[in-house]
Amino acid sequence: MNDASLPAEARTDLERGLRQMQLDAAFAPPLLAYLALLARWNRTYNLTAIRDPREMVTRHLLDSLALRPYIEAGTLADLGTGPGLPGIPLAITRPQLQVTLVESNGKKARFMREAVRQLGLGNARVAESRAEALDEAAAYDHLTARALDTLDGIIAVGGHLLQPGGTLLAMKGVHPHEEIAALPAGWSVQSVQPLQVPGLTGERHLVVVRKDG
């Protein structure tokens, strides 16, 4: 697998974005290999509505990597990950993080298994399941959900997966004041971080929610 099918501008955009995010340029080849595979499968299986590779760099790769400073190691369940976002970019750039990619859509799960295999990601596994049906209670230090639901909705379907004291890292657009106010008992906001994603216009926030206990 290589990135020869991608436009040269996509590589340039990614390398520039990695520099702006102070990330190692050595991450570019595996990230581009993942993107090339995604673009190729997407032509047949419609895994993501975004078709332009340069837009994929910004809205898929760099947006996912904006989460990286807030999660370093331990176990992570990425709920409703789709084609592996943000889980696969995090697994590539955080080899000490054990990532479970939770996705019920069969086509997307097959794609991710192939991506994990081709990229040699020993720290990633695919769980083809709905989050609420995953029988791994309190197995994870962290949950992510990039575009799954409201905060209380994410907790309703995946909160059982998180161990007490663990954190949900939810990526949002504008500051979700109403969602925070609607958090169920036993969950508390640890922080709300504005995210800077190179090339992305509009607001982006990371909400870190702790499971009390």
Image (spheres, helix red, strand yellow):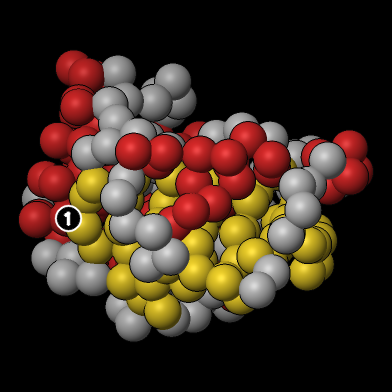
Residue 170 in sight here: yes
The 10 Å Cα crowd at callout 1, few under 14, some 14 to 19, many 20 or more, is many
- Image quadrant of residue 80? top left
Left-right relation of 143 to 99: right
Q: Quadrant of residue 103?
A: top left
Give above or below for 138 relative to 179.
below
Residue nearest the observer in this picture, 15 or 79: 79
User: Where residue 157 appears, x then y in whole percent?
Assistant: 51, 39
Q: Quadrant of the C terminus?
A: bottom right
27 relative position to 50: left or right: left
Residue closer to the observer: 196 or 160: 160
Task: Give the residue number, with chain letter if any, for mark 1.
Answer: 116
Where is residue 7? Give x, y as percent. Answer: 33, 39
Q: Where's residue 167, x and y in %?
A: 60, 67
Which quadrant of the figure has residue 120? bottom left
**Which one is in front, 202 or 69?**
69
Which residue does the image show at 27% across and 26% down from the upper left? 105
Question: Is residue 39 placed above or below 168 in the rendered structure?
Answer: above
Residue, x 31% and y 71% (percent of image)?
98
What amino acid type is highlighted by mark number 1? Val
- The number of numbered discs placed on residues in the rendered structure image is 1
Q: Please tell me which residue is depicted at 21% across the width and 57% down the height of the picture.
A: 125
Evaluate whether residue 60 shows in this view: no
Side (left or right) of 193 relative to 20? right
Above-or-below relation of 95 to 91: below
Q: Secondary structure at mark 1?
A: helix
Question: Which residue does the image show at 44% across and 45% down from the upper left?
Answer: 79
